[in-house]
């Protein structure tokens, strides 16, 4: 098969700020290792790139690097050669919106009009108006990890206060655009059958336009580090503090039950604690300050080593389009307790303890059960590692991507003959 020139679009690609930066880095590396030329075309913050991958920066204002009004005004004022997109971005953020997807889409469209020598364009979930224009120029694949309608729903469930609900309405105003754009995208890749179902329902997309390809994992980094000793009472979870979707509250409540029986129990959270935010206040109210550590800006190897130090991994999310922490824990052979919701059962198979979501009592009971019969659950976790190798290695995933990409390019050529 011929080697391709691929444009990978990403409206923001923070290397340590969640799954998007990880996905952009990993898929670009995997495709480049197959011999394709991959250009990441990204808005700020920019991704960490691997060897043989090219980064093309499309500067936006990146106003979410700070929450200081004065700093945001300074950033806008000092931007040279401001465009209409910069003015729109600044005004939208000023009134509580998140405009980066929309403005990046137009910037990417303008760039590709003048640089159209790509075989295919892959957009990482901007689902913006610009993609409809790009789709007329070049074969396009839209990656939709899950519909952000789910984040919005869970945010509203977390707080009924009128001001909060209005702020969420403003923040998620981009959903109007995505609901208009998504049904007109001809080719969508999503990482789970559960996401396909939710995209079909919430975005009114035809399931025939979608392919399910799991996200991959670097199984040579996320390994059981046998030279690192596990703390028998150490738990680990990954959560963006104060993001209701991740269900961290339920892990904290379970920990407060368990500390009465296990005085040395402790928890590591891969994520950043917001100063004086909801999670910080809950930790203080439950008296957990001395048994929780938050760790952020970790490399993949450092995260894998944190798993190696831990005896039980917890994923208490309320929703996951594709849960990286689930397959990370399994790949590291750490006994996993996870919420029985959305894509999680699909990913874990028979190799995790599944509990009802939003149920801290069931979570606490399951943790006690694993502690009391650890060898049994350790053996299950070791089989879970094999499950990850069989289903989530980038070697397998990249072959699936290539198969879909070549077909889409061929269909595009045939349609334009």
Image (cartoon, helix red, strand yellow):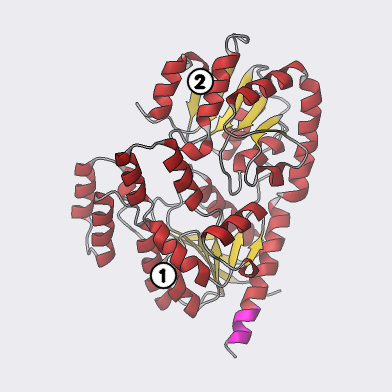
Which residue corresponds to the image point at 19% horizontal and 48% vertical from the top-left? 74
Which residue corresponds to the image point at 39% horizontal and 52% vertical from the top-left? 172
Query: What secondary structure predominates along the stretch shown in magenta?
Result: helix
Q: Vertical placement of 187 versus 218: above or below?
A: below
Which of the 4 quarters of the picture holds residue 359? top right
Q: CA distance from mark 1 to mark 2?
A: 44 Å
Say if residue 321 shows up in the picture.
yes
Instruction: Tell me whether the residue at label 1 lies in contact with that at label 2, contact meaning CB atoms closer than 8 angstroms.
Output: no
* Mark 1 / mark 2, whichever is N-terminal: 1
Please name whichever residue, 302 or 339, is drawn nearer the observer in this view of the structure. 339
In which quadrant will I find the N terminus?
Answer: bottom right
Q: Position of residue 133 (x, y in %)?
A: 43, 75
Q: Vertical placement of 98 versus 181: above or below?
A: above
Q: Which residue is mark 2?
A: 292
Q: Vertical placement of 138 versus 200: above or below?
A: below
Classify mark 2: residues with Cα within 10 Å, few (<14), some (14-19) or many (20+). Answer: some
Please name whichever residue, 157 or 141, is drawn nearer the observer in this view of the structure. 157
For the record, the magenta segment spans: 410-415
Classify mark 1: residues with Cα within 10 Å, few (<14), some (14-19) or many (20+). Answer: many
Q: Which residue is mark 1?
A: 130
Residue 233 is inside the magenta segment: no
In which quadrant will I find the C terminus?
Answer: bottom right
SS type, badge 2: strand
Residue 414 is inside the magenta segment: yes
């Amino acid at each position: 098969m011929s080697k391709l020139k691929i444009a990978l679009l990403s409206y923001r690609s923070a290397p340590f700020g969640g799954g998007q930066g990880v996905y952009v880095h990993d898929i670009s590396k995997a495709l480049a290792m197959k011999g394709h030329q991959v250009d990441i075309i990204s808005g700020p913050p920019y991704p960490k790139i691997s060897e043989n991958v090219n980064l093309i920066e499309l500067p936006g204002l990146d106003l979410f690097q700070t929450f200081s009004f004065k700093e945001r005004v300074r950033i806008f004022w000092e931007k040279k050669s401001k465009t209409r997109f910069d003015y729109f971005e600044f005004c939208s953020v000023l009134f509580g919106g998140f405009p980066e997807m929309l403005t990046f889409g137009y910037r990417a469209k303008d760039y590709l009009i003048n640089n159209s020598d790509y075989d295919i364009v892959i957009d990482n979930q901007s689902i913006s108006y610009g993609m409809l224009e790009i789709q007329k120029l070049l074969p396009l694949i839209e990656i939709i990890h899950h519909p952000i309608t789910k984040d919005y729903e869970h945010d509203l469930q977390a707080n009924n206060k009128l001001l909060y609900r209005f702020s969420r309405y403003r923040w998620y105003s981009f959903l109007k655009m995505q609901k208009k754009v998504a049904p007109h995208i001809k080719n969508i890749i999503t990482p789970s059958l559960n996401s396909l179902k939710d995209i079909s329902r919430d975005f009114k997309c035809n399931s025939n336009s979608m392919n399910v390809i799991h996200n991959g994992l670097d199984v040579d980094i996320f390994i059981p580090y046998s030279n690192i000793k596990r703390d028998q009472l150490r738990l680990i979870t990954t959560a963006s503090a104060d993001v209701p979707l991740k269900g961290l509250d339920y892990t904290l409540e379970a920990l407060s039950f368990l500390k009465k029986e296990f005085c040395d129990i402790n928890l590591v959270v891969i994520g950043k604690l917001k100063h004086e935010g909801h999670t910080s206040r809950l930790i203080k109210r439950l008296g957990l300050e001395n048994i929780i550590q938050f760790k952020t800006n970790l490399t993949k190897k450092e995260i894998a080593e944190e798993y190696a130090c831990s005896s039980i991994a917890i994923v208490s999310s309320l929703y996951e389009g594709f849960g990286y922490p689930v397959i990370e824990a399994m790949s590291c052979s750490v006994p996993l307790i996870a919420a029985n919701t959305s894509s999680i059962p699909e990913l874990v198979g028979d190799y995790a303890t599944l509990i009802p979501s939003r149920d801290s009592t069931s979570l606490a009971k399951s943790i006690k059960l694993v502690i009391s019969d650890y060898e049994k659950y350790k053996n299950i976790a070791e089989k879970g590692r094999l499950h990850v190798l069989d289903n989530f290695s980038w070697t397998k995933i990249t072959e699936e991507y290539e198969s879909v990409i070549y077909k889409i390019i061929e269909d595009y050529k045939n349609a334009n003959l």
